[in-house]
């Protein structure tokens, strides 16, 4: 059967980012920088490399700076042109999505991730689409979504990226139940639970923030009541969809940084800095000194 191509992606950015207050009082969490680019830029780049042509940002109050970041900055770019700063201009052009390739819709209240995704229903329409959680940074080549698209082209249905997490941390994540060998490259997902109580997780594989879903999810989200944490959970709607359609888990190959947490954010900064030869030469001695203490 011919599978519909994954052309569109939803990036939910309407959360409050309370774990980073006061930094996120006026600045969206997604605009915090990893070395020299905002977190969300890495995620948009990952989506574009996977063939995504249109990105739907689900935003909230105080998030307009994200829209500006992906637009042309006329004053800045004119000044750079006057000063002959071609390298900087090229950089800005390379990170910009195509004209008309972005949409912005508002989640008026932060009622949960499931509700945020549902807010994108009209902009996505009746086609399978990707979701990328912009605070999860996935470092790999090919990118995580590219790896998932490759699997989707074989399996169709719904595809979710999963990754092993230490047993004592499963209560922080959405955890999948699987049928078959948990170390296989792809696994058949038979269930999932959001933030299971310690000792009750059905596996050690957590959903790390990348999804390819069929549009039927929107109808299920429409009816979805509140779940864990009093929020409308995407996990609960996916569980309902699992009764009708297949879910394949891809064991992601690469590094994941949870930039919604301070430790993950700092680790990502160090990892990306160490990848840059010049920067690595400067910070390695500093890190070595600090670690001696
Ligand atoms: P998180 O719960 O990790 O993000 O949601 P948060 O609420 O921004 O951060 P904290 O916990 O208060 O520090 C995961 C993703 O889902 C989006 C967030 O923006 C984030 O990208 N989200 C969450 C929404 O868009 N709307 C919501 O109602 C909830």
Image (cartoon, helix red, strand yellow):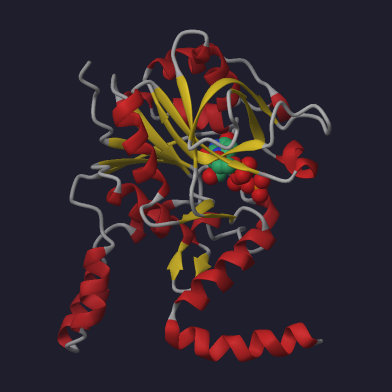
The answer to whether residue 9 of the structure is visible from this angle is no
* Vertical order, 142 against 162 (above or below): below
* Vertical order, 203 against 191 (above or below): below
Image x and y of residue 226, in percent: 65, 20
Quadrant (top left, top right, bottom left, bottom right) of the C terminus = bottom right
* Vertical order, 34 against 293 (above or below): above
Q: Which residue is rendered at x = 65% and y = 89% of the image?
A: 286
Task: Give 127 or 232, whichever is nearer the viewer.
Answer: 127
Give the image quarter of residue 202: top right
Q: Is residue 275 left or right of residue 286?
A: left
Q: Which residue is rendered at x = 16% and y = 81% of the image?
A: 81
Q: Is residue 89 left or right of residue 250?
A: left
Give the image quarter of residue 265: bottom right
Q: Which residue is rendered at x = 73% and y = 46% of the image?
A: 166
* Vertical order, 248 against 224 (above or below): below
Extreme residue in the top direction: 244
């Amino acid at each position: 059967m011919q599978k519909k191509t994954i052309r569109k992606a939803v990036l939910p950015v309407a959360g409050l980012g309370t774990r980073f207050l006061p930094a996120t009082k006026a600045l969206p969490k997604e605009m915090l920088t990893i070395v020299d680019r905002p977190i969300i830029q890495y995620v948009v780049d990952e989506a574009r490399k996977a063939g995504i042509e249109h990105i739907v940002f689900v935003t909230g109050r105080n998030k307009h700076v994200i829209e500006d970041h992906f637009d042309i900055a006329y004053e800045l770019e004119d000044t750079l042109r006057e000063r002959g700063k071609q390298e900087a201009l090229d950089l800005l052009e390379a990170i910009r999505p195509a004209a008309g390739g972005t949409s912005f819709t508002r989640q008026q209240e932060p009622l949960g991730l499931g509700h945020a995704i549902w807010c994108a229903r009209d902009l996505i329409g009746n086609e399978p689409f990707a979701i990328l959680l912009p605070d999860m940074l996935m470092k790999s080549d090919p990118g995580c979504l590219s790896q998932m698209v490759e699997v989707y082209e074989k399996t169709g249905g719904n595809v979710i990226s999963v990754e092993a997490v230490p047993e004592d941390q499963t209560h922080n994540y959405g955890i999948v139940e699987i049928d078959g060998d948990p170390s296989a490259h792809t696994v058949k997902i038979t269930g999932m639970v959001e933030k299971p109580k310690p000792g009750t997780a059905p596996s050690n594989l957590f959903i790390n923030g990348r999804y390819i879903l069929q549009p039927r999810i929107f109808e299920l989200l429409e009816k979805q009541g509140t779940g864990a944490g009093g929020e409308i959970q995407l996990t609960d709607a996916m569980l309902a969809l699992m009764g009708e359609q297949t879910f394949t888990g891809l064991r992601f190959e690469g590094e994941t940084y949870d930039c919604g947490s301070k430790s993950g954010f700092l680790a990502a900064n160090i990892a990306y800095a160490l990848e840059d030869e010049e920067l690595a030469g400067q910070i390695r001695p500093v890190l070595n000194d600090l670690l001696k203490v």
